[in-house]
Image (spheres, coloured by chain):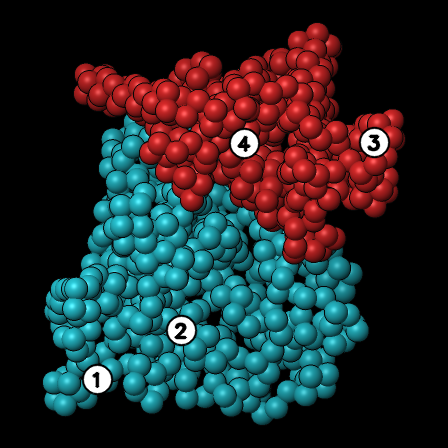
Amino acid sequence: MAEPTTATLPATSRRPRLHVMGALGLLLVALLIFWLAVNLEKTPAQFFHAFLIGFTNGAVYALVALGYTLVYGILELINFAHGDVFMLGGMISMTMISEVFKLHAGQSALVVWGGVAATFAIATIGCGLINVTVERIAYRPLRGAPRLVPLITAIAASFILQNIALATKGANFVSLNTGPSGAADFLPQGSVFTLGGVHYTWPQFIVVLITAPVLVALVYLVQRTRQGKAMRATAQDREAAAMMGIDVNRTISFTFLIAGSLAGAAGLIYALYFTSVVFYQGFQLGLIAFTCAVLGGIGNLPGAVLGGLLIGLIQAFNNTLSWHAPGSDWTQSIVFAILILILVFRPEGLLGERTPEGG
Amino acid sequence: MRLPRPTASPLWALLGLFGLKEARWRSLHPMARRVVIAAVVGLVVLAVLGPIFGLDTSALLTYAVFLVLYIPSWERFGRVGRFILPGAILALVVTYPYYNTKLFTIPILGAFPDVHTAVVMLIYVMMAVGLNVVVGYAGLLDLGYVAFYAIGAYTAAALASTQFAGQLPNGNPKRFFSFGSIGVDKAIGGIHISVWLLLIIAGILTSLIGMLIGLPTLRLRGDYLAIVTLGFGEILPQVARNGDNFFNTGINITNGPQGITSMDAIGFGHWLHQNVGLPENYLSAPNSDRLFFWTAIVLVLFTIFCSLRLRDSKLGRAWIAIREDETAAAAMGVPLMRTKTLAYAIGAFFGGVAGAYFAEFTTGANPDSFSFNFSVFVLVMVILGGIGNVWGVLVGAAFLAYLDQAGLADTGAWINQHLHLTIDVPKYEFGIYGVILLLVMLFRPNGLVPEARRKLEFEQGVEDEPLYDLAIE
């Protein structure tokens, strides 16, 4: 593709600076590992507690990050509205659980799981369709436009989705009843196992229980099916794919459908685990998830999962650990600092390939 | 860039039914065209809006002023001709505080803004014109412009208040430094630098920080740069909010969630008041808002002047070259990094000055006024008005600032009253901006008042980098 490449300075003046920057980056990582090791040594129980929280949050981030990465991989577009699709997924789940299926504590396991499964289906399909609609209205008509134009309409779409939630669900947090574990009360509470005083709770396990099959299904879809092949081909070279008889428009729509479904699944998990959603939450979480996607290497599916887990862990460690942790006041700043550092030092991310544009 | 023009063609098709052809209209003398447009506007106002909303004589007067300014080709009147129109508009704006209460009520939107609102509008205009340098001229999407605004506001607030007074064991302030400040008592302590000087200091400091942010990030591709700026825009308010105790070290720079309050007053001091007649102290003056209004006009004029001169300078042409095609610009010898960094620094400068002046106007800086939404708000001003065109940005910014300050609430009240609804319209402010952004981008991507150069490109077409180039639809 003929893209304007960022003009590079002559190699001679460029090389030494990159080395310095690379060394700085390595130093940062080394400091991080040292900090973690000291904390592990001082308070091992706290460390593992934080690890489990981070792992669970990371699973949610990973699902949302996958949506960013899928869309970016195929369109090279940062879909700002994705976080808000996730938020709408949470809202749909809330409505289904508390108003349609009326799940509450003390119901039989069959009713609860049936309700959750039905909510899952509705939330994923609903969010998939919302995402397809956003693409159809806000991105497709602007295919010939300069690169920044769809980025601006993405922000517009994000605000519109937020306000749809604001109009339908109000400005306050929409909540479920919580059980002793802090998750929705109709879920099994208790611990799956306890290790050295650290409880791995059922809700935490349920998050992984839902995320893992979704990821397996996604990998199967992308790697093994015809539609997945079309997606990969379109992501690699749109024109060539079109020449090979792939309906590119349909493939793009399908990608948005899958990305939206992942956001819907994440929304359901978020609703079950954190039990409260508010209309402006999606944008923030979307930015964090985007950071995860960039950290792992945008356009790279395993990278998004890795990035999600890493960011989840970093956030949890920062909020929970006691030895020289900046604390939860600084969580956002740390995530965005990581985003900026990654973009400056290693724009291709941890697992991505270096492209000529440096991005 | 081929984009649909769905609004113009149906209109001409409709007028065509009555024998009016677009070609015939275009062949008319410009003045004749303006007479017809003015007559149509007058007819609509007098025959339709007048009876419904009960417009009074001030509406007629406004219409008369509009006719005088709009119809004749003033720029053709000799050597002074090109100054007549801007001069007349400037005179109208400057005298605004004297007649704003006597004006009619705009249908639906409500009354003309009061002077206090007008000051906020002018500050927003200044920010939008500043952001236009970055987004419009150089084509760098900046989603964290509010960061510069915040830096400006906090710089001014911290250096002209009791923020750094400290405390001695006996309860007295530890340090006191004053330079050109007015009406400050030594007993209160703190740093007090002249607020005029602070406008410049804040601007320079902000542009330095803009350069610092820009240097490592500007080599990134456009959309990545947008994300990085957004990241800075998210980090800085958090720094402001947590800055009363950095990592439990006890260092207090921003005074945390309360923000910095009770800034020094702006004014010219006693000597200038006595000898030149300039106001001594804005806050204690009886016509405080008017003084802030006129000062804001001076700042906006300065911003517009710089902006226009920069656009026509070598640097401005380099910016536009980069915006249009970075590779070609680099091949032609435009130093990319330096040019982009300068755009960033200059945009940041105006953001910083606007922030400092806003802090002076509200006598403090508060971390809650700097959110991502605000960055987008300023971006909508630039896009609605016409990216790259200072005059368009001016109109877009003034209009949106008015909506934000008063118009939206009035419109909501009007809708609720006439349709018997109870919608809280201002609650959906950003949803409305989202719709505006989307519609402008889809149907009028160059804004309401497109830049002449962009308009040409738009009509003649340029080879532009496609997002994805498929002819199949």
| Same chain for the residues under marks 1 and 3 in the image | no
Mark 1 or mark 2, which has the lower sequence index? 2
User: In front here: B238 or A355?
Assistant: B238
Quarter in which the C terminus of chain B is drawn = top right
A69 w.r.t. B281: above or below: above
Precedes in sequence: disc 4 or disc 3: 3
Residue B407: % across, % down: 58, 71
Count the marks: 4
Residue lying at 44% horizontally and 74% vertically, measured from the top left = B118
Letter of the chain that mark 3 sits on in the rendering: A
Q: Secondary structure at mark 4?
A: helix
Mark 4 on the same chain as mark 3? yes
Of discs 4 and 3, which sits in the foreground?
3
Identify by letter the chain in cyan. B
In x, y percent, where is residue A301?
A: 57, 17
Chain given the colour red: A
Where does residue B114 sit, x and y in percent of width and height? 48, 80
Asked where in the image residue A66 lies, by quadrant, the reply is top right
Which of pointers 1 and 3 indicates the residue nearer the eye? 3
Task: Look at the picture and state if B89 lies above or below B427.
Answer: below
State the separation of the CA atoms marked 1 and 4: 53 Å
Circle 3 sits on which residue? A112
Q: Amino acid at mark 2?
A: Val
Q: Return the mark for residue B280.
A: 1
Q: Residue B119: give its label.
A: 2
